[in-house]
Image: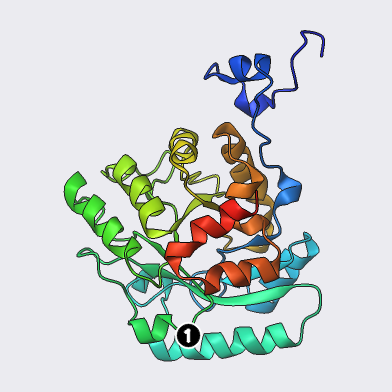
Amino acid sequence: DYFGLIFVPPEMREDTGEIERAVEDHFPSVISLDDIRGDLHCHTDWSDGRFPMDEMVEAAQSRGLEYLAITDHSPSATVANGLTPDRLNSHNHTVRTMGSDLAGIELLTGTEMDIKPDGSLDYSDEVLSDLDIVIASIHSAMDQDQAIMTKRVISAMQSPHVDVICHLTARLLERRAPVMMDVESVLEAAVLTGTVMEINCSPDRLDLKADHVRRAVELGVIFAINTDSHRINQFDNLRFGVQTAIRGWVEKKQVVNTLTFHELRRFLNLPKSDRYEFMKSRG
């Protein structure tokens, strides 16, 4: 107010047009931590998580989350004890049984499914159709060239079952460089296919990074801000993803896990081709 400007969140103060927007009084209503209602990416000791499912659910609920997707790994992730189709079926039964006994938090069946090197998926369409949500990611053949890697991810996006692409570039900060990929083409494909892009909250990842988030906002991409928790304390990392989203100028209306549980169910039950319009209709 001292300078006659509206408040600019510290995360946005990067000399990328925020002052000009503030002067014009045409400033985005960026997301806040309180806007997040659920987490669509976490792991339990069924795969490579460190805690049982009930403890992960309790930890999420104690932090005020209204819903949680249990997304343990798929078979190709052998190092992460990925679930065979039979184990996934048992996993789904456990999630549904636990969810029916809970009050105050809703559970979704899901998987973090590997995108294979040729772009094919780690589960059949029949298996995927039994899940509430499918998130997909790269965990192998990370040395592929840019053209092949880009085609690989876009191929996965074209599946009607792949709801979210998570930690797109597979980077691990100070440990693993991002894969080679035409991120612009992938973000454009997200809009064309109705696929959600994850902002991964893990301090080891922060992927999408802020520059990619900002470009995705310009293209009209829809996001999920997820913790990728493997331990109960990692749900506290949600703030890092929100801060990354703020740096990218993301608004609440662009994030699927700001939806109520019933709205999220409606979103996921729509054909992917209709989902972006659903989010736009919320204003």
Residue 79: which quarter of the image? bottom left
Relative to 173, say whether 255 is above or below: below
Apparent side of residue 244 relative to residue 146 in the rendered image (left or right)? right
For mark 1, does the 10 Å Cα neighbourhood hold few (<14), some (14 to 19), or many (20 or more) residues?
some
Using the rendered image of the protein, determine whether residue 6 is visible from the camera's viewpoint.
yes
Q: Mark 1: which secondary structure?
A: loop
Quadrant of the image for the N terminus?
top right
Q: How far from the left and from the top, in percent, is residue 220? A: 47, 44
Q: Point out the residue furthest to the top here.
A: 3
Apparent side of residue 56 relative to residue 92 in the rendered image (left or right)? right
Q: Which residue is more in the foreground, 40 or 140?
A: 40
Residue 109: which quarter of the image? bottom right
Residue 69: which quarter of the image? bottom right
The residue drawn where x is 74% and y is 15% is 5
Q: How far from the left and from the top, in percent, is residue 88? A: 46, 85
Q: How far from the left and from the top, in percent, is residue 157? A: 34, 61
**What colour scheme was applied to this rendering of the protein?**
rainbow
The tally of labels here is: 1
Relative to 79, say whether 101 is above or below: below
Residue that numbered label 1 is attached to: 130
Apparent side of residue 44 relative to residue 8 in the rendered image (left or right)? left
Q: How far from the left and from the top, in percent, is residue 259? A: 67, 60
Q: Which residue is more in the foreground, 145 or 82?
A: 145
Amino acid of disc 1 = Asp
The residue drawn where x is 33% and y is 40% is 184
The residue drawn where x is 69% and y is 69% is 261
Apparent side of residue 164 relative to residue 99 in the rendered image (left or right)? left
The residue drawn where x is 67% and y is 63% is 232
Using the rendered image of the protein, determine whether residue 163 is visible from the camera's viewpoint.
no
